[in-house]
Structures are given as C-alpha cells and as structure tokens.
Amino acid sequence: MADLRAVDHHMDGLRVLIASTPVGALGSGIGGGVELTLHNLVYGLGLRGHHVEVVAPADSLHVGERVHQIDGALQVSAQGLCREASTELPAGSVLAAMWSHIGSLQHETDVIINLAYDWLPYHLTQFLHVPVLHLVSMGSLSDAMDQVITEVERLRPGRLAVHSAAQAATFPDPSIFRVVGNGIVAERYDVQLTVPADAPLGFVGRISPEKGLEDVAELSARTGHRVLVWGILQDEVYWQRVQADNPQAILEYQGFLPTDDLQAQLGACAALVMTPKWVEAFGNVAIEAMAVGVPVIAYGRGGPAEIVDDGVTGFVVPADDIDALIAAVARVGEIDRAACRQRVDNEYSSGAMADRVLAWIDDVLAAPVRV
C-alpha cells in the first residue's frame, strides 16, 4: 500500500525542523562544516518564506525561529573511529534525547532535515510519521553507517543527499544519493579584490591529521611563504609534530574565529590551500574563501576539487603532489578575484542552496510512502 503525500508548502510556508550534530553545541566549532551548513539552511529557507526550528545540544547559539536546547552527553565524532566500530551511545546521550524530543514535535512539523552522521537518526526514519531527510555530512567511514544508510534507501527511497559526487562515490552505491552541494550566506562576506605582493597564504580547518597541514608546512618551508592557520586545535600533538618536522615553515596559528572575523582576515590572503588526506564531503572553507575573493588551491581529492573551477577560481592539483602545489601557488596572480566571488553568488549562495533543498523536499513529499 502507498500513502501519497501531497506537496503543500502552505500559504505561510513549510514548517522545517533541522536536527543538528550531537558532537557539540552550535557555535563551538566542534561540529565543523555541519554548523555552517545548518546556519546557511536556516537562513536560505527563511528567505524563501519557510519556518525553521533547530534541535541542538545545550548551550548552542540561537539560529532560526527557535533552537530547542537539549541536555546530555555529547556523541563521539565518527571520523575518529575505525570502520568496524560498533554503534554506541554514552550514558545520558544527547543524541537520544534530541531524537526523543524530535518525536514529540512531529505534529508541529512538515519535514525534518537531519545533519547528524550517526546511526540512530537513520534507524528512526521508518518509525517517524513526518518525512525525515538526511543530508549526509561525511563520506563512508563505518560499516554500521553504510548499512543503515542503505536501509533508509530501501525503506524510504529518495531521503538521502550528499554535498558532492566525490563524497557519494565513497559509499557502496553512489546512485542512492542526491547531490545538493552547499552554500553560505554570501551577504556576510566582503570581497577583497587586491592584496599586497607579500600577502600570506591561508589554511582553515580543524588541526587534525585528516586535514593534511603537514603538506602546507612543507610548502611553506620550501618556498618561504607565510601561512596563517585558523581552526579548532583538535590535536595538539599533531600540531607540534607538524612544526617539529618542518622547522623552516612559517605557520602562524590564529585560533578559531566566528564567521564575520574569519572572513575579514581570510580576505587578505593570496590564496587558500586545501590539502586533505581524506575525502572531504564538500569543503565549506573553499566557498568562504572564494566569497572574499581568495583563490583556492586544492588537492584533487573530494569535494574541493568539484568546487574549484581550475584556472578560473584557483587550481586543482594531483593529491599529495607538493611540487604541483608549489607550482600552483606561484600562479595565483593569474586568478581574477572577482570571478571567485561571482562563482559563489551563482552557485553557492544561501538562496541557491535553499532552492536545491526545496526541490528535494518537494520530491519527497510528492512520493508515495511505503507502508
């Protein structure tokens, strides 16, 4: 049997509930790109006349019309676990409490968008009466997650989306995902069209091994380029090792900054360098850099390689090829910084992202539900 849900955005807009990541409060930076994605979705959907509320761990910043603050023990991020790791919830889990609360809000909601890369929300999809859509925030990291994601597609087809084709390709069946990209509130970013000849390079991201900061350090040591580093200092031992292994590198740690402060400082860089050692699902910092006119030099690995228009908004070089990285840095003067901002306005604004997500929601609401 099939229960056909009619597409109805209501005269006063959809009621959308967004489930945040349970690894940290909004504004803490622990959630990485998920936090930026959430803020962008709230803003973009609001621009289109929809009503957005958020469920997030306690002490989160206020976004949307309301943030439901949930107490509990934070979840361990999946990126630090091995593929064979079992699914676990800590005692007093905030994840469990968040989804219990979400269940209680069903009668007030038209659609739920889950941003958490955790087993429980995917498993609960079949049991909730309101449609749950999952915007997968990372590539394939565990067998348990691969299995439950596949099960969602079997039971509720069309509910899965990713940020990039490269991210989808890490999973056993890439065809089950819709690619929706990402976006930022471009209005918050002030483009800087010129920088001095000795402008520094920039690196933005968690200070942890999967981000590949050691390659940027080697670039700096070999060329003398100064590199400003922003992000959560997640692995201090790794940070110390990178510096010890590259004593000639000029790395200046600037801390973790809120968006308005980061964009102002990042805009003064000659280029942003992205050297991930894992498959980045998207690479929000790439569009943040381009929004302020900064060219992006990225390894051909993961989402950043799909964002950068090679030779127009930056350069894509073979992954792990530091000689190619150095050569690309020498060519950043060829890039028109205005073209970098234009690409963001065209493809990665909050409005453009909201339109892609709304098209996804429309398809889900129009589809027959298996019972």
Image (tube, grey):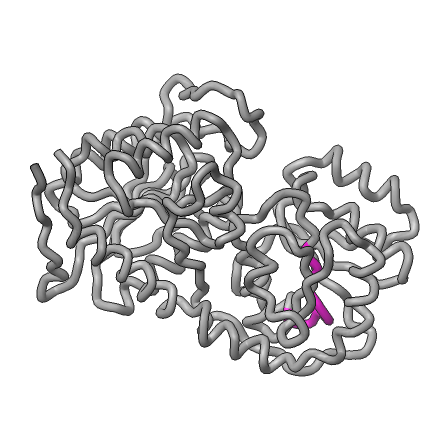
Q: Quadrant of residue 200?
A: bottom right
Residue in the picture at 71% in, 68% down? 271
Q: Residue at x 17, y 58 (%)?
A: 14
- Indicate left or right for 86 with 326 as reference: left
Percent of width and height locating residue 327:
82, 66
In the image, is residue 339 above or below residue 5? below
Residue 99 pos. (x, y %)? 27, 32
Q: Is residue 18 left or right of residue 305?
A: left
Q: Is residue 129 magenta?
A: no
Q: Which residues are magenta?
A: 267-274
- Which quadrant: the C terminus? top left
220 vs 309, left or right, is right
| Residue 240 visible within the image | yes
Position above or below: 143 against 201: above
Q: Quadrant of the N terminus?
A: top left
Q: Residue at x 68, y 74 (%)?
A: 311
Say if 371 sits above or below 367 in the image. Answer: above
